[in-house]
Structures are given as structure tokens and as C-alpha cells.
Amino acid sequence: MRFLLGLLALALAGHAPAQELAPKLLLRVAEFAELLQAVAPKALAEETLEQGTVVAEGGLRVRVGAAARAPRPVRVQSRVIVSEFTYAPLNSSEGGNLLEFRQVVSVDGRAAQSAEAARHALSLGVHSANDQARKRMLENFASHGLVDLATDYSLILLAFTGKGQESLTIDASGEEFIGAEDCLVYSWRQTSAAAGALIFAGREVAREALAGKLWVGKADGLPLRVSAVASHVSGKQTISDDAVVDYALSERGFIEPVSVRHRHLIGGELRTENVFRYGPFHLFAADSEIKFTVDGDPIEK
């Protein structure tokens, strides 16, 4: 009922000036974020990652003279990884912050395991989730020829729960269209790195404070897009990661991630692009055709 009353209030305020509508929309965003936080641990989907990486030809051979100044030939290495995908908190997490969990089904069209086996392994991983298990799962994911991998961006909307917004600075930043949707745009910035997206590369993990933009539908308060960027200096180069996450309203009435486009840049040059796409999310606690257990039975869809 609270949800419907909120939408009615937005509809009645549809012609209000943007500065008057903004607080109402941010309240709606918080409600959608909190609903996603509640249902995400019950959600299961297929994730497809397409990664393109710029790789220098010639390895690490030493070049001198004119050869050292000439641009090094490069090629683009591509990977397509399909995984079974869900969310869960780490057992050691006091705040219950959700993270992404996945099990690879295929690599570049070649089967790594069956979808049923992947769901069963995913179930085991979720129910024994700890820092080491999570890191092993990420390392296994990266071992399929992936580099400059960044995860957990699909849940960036959770930074905009009521509690989350207390850790952000948010300012109105104009109006734009996403397709046919008229949106208000907000600029946002985290006041600390504690809730930053987990950036995973090889065996190293780091959390960076994020900043970006939020696109919210003026008519219904739907958060449709979130962008984020983080950067730091390493040696003499600036290393940046930026991402754009698109969301849509599911048939069950909650916001779900549709895609994540992440770019890793070194010195302003694009090195890696990761594009994650998600099939419709099934709620395994509600859909009778989905079983998600750890009792030895295969998980069925």
C-alpha cells in the first residue's frame, strides 16, 4: 500500500517544478533500492559477460632507440563467459552487505559444466560464504582468461537506500531522456569508500570511493540508470574505472539490473571493457520450478 500511495503522490505531482519533485523522487528511489535489497538474496539469473582487452603484441621484449618510441602493435582479446548468478551476504559481514556470486557455465561457447551443476555449486558457495570462499570464486572466474575484472556494480543501486543516502552527497543535475522516459538526473558522491564497489584484478582487491550520476523517471520515481567512476594514481599514471548500470522494473514489481558496462583505463587509454548482461531474475523462494538447496539434489529451473 505504501508503494502504491507513493506512486499516486508522484502522479499527482507530475507537473510540479523539478526542484519540488526531486525530494519525492529520492524517497521513491530509496524504496525501490530497499525492495531490491530484500529480494536480491532470493534471485537467480543467467549472466553473460563479454570482455574485450587491449593486449600489446611482442610480450615484454626490450626495445631501444626508434623502436622504443614507436607505438607497439596491439590486438583485442575477447572472451564471452556465461554464468549462473545470484547475490548473498558474506557470513562474516556484520551489516549483511550483499555481494555477487557466480558459477561459470561456458567460456567462448565451450561448456565448463552443466547449468544444473553450476547452480548446485553456487548454492554451496552461497551457504558457506566467507572471505576466502568468495575470493576463490572470483579467482576461478578470472582464471578463464579474464583481466581487469570489476564486480558488484550491478547492486550499486543499494547505495541509494534511505540509510545509504545518508552517506552520499546528492545534487540535482538537470533533466535527460532515457529512451522515451523523461528523467531527472542527480550527481552523487560517496563520503567514504566503505560502500564502494569491489574492484577485483588478479589477486588484488580494493575499494574506492565512487561518484557518478543517477537517472530517475519523473513520472514514477523508477531508478533507471546509475553511473559511477573511481580513480587513483599509481606511480605516474592515473588508473580509472567507470561503469554505467541500467535497471528495469521486473514483472514482479522490483527493480532488477539489466546490464553493466565497465571500462578500465590507464593514463586515459581504454585497456579493458566488460559488458555484463542479465536474463530475467527468477525468485527461487517464490517460483515453484526453481529449487535452490544444498542437500545434494541438483538445482532445477
Image (cartoon, rainbow, N blue to C red):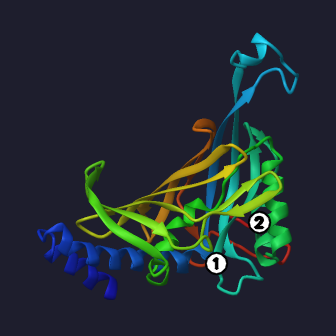
Q: Residue at x 60, y 36 (%)?
A: 270
Mark 2 surroundings within 10 Å by alpha-carbon count, few (fewer than 14), some (14 through 19), many (20 or more):
many
Q: Is residue 68 above or below residue 256?
A: above
Question: Which of labels 2 and 1 is toward the front?
Answer: 1
State the image coordinates of residue 220 (x, y, percent, origin top left).
Answer: 27, 69
In the picture, the disc for residue 122 is 2
Q: Amino acid at mark 2?
A: Leu
Mark 1 surroundings within 10 Å by alpha-carbon count, few (fewer than 14), some (14 through 19), many (20 or more):
some
Quarter of the rendering occupied by the C terminus: bottom right
Q: Is residue 214 above or below residue 82?
A: below
**Residue that mark 1 sits on:** 97
- Helix, strand or loop under label 2: helix
Q: Residue at x 76, y 66 (%)?
A: 122
- Helix, strand or loop under label 1: loop
Quarter of the rendering containing residue 216? bottom left
Q: Residue at x 65, y 66 (%)?
A: 86
Q: CA distance from mark 2 to mark 1?
A: 18 Å
Q: Is residue 208 left or right of residue 102?
A: left
Quarter of the rendering occupied by the N terminus: bottom left
Residue 247 seen in this snapshot = yes
Q: Give whichever of 205, 65 is nearer the camera.
A: 65
Q: Is residue 147 left or right of residue 262?
A: right
Residue 253 seen in this snapshot = no
State the image coordinates of residue 159 (x, y, percent, origin top left).
Answer: 51, 72
Quarter of the rendering containing residue 254? bottom left
Please count the marks in the image: 2
Q: Amino acid at mark 1?
A: Asn
Q: Give whichever of 282, 162 is nearer the camera.
A: 162
State the image coordinates of residue 168 (x, y, percent, origin top left).
Answer: 46, 74
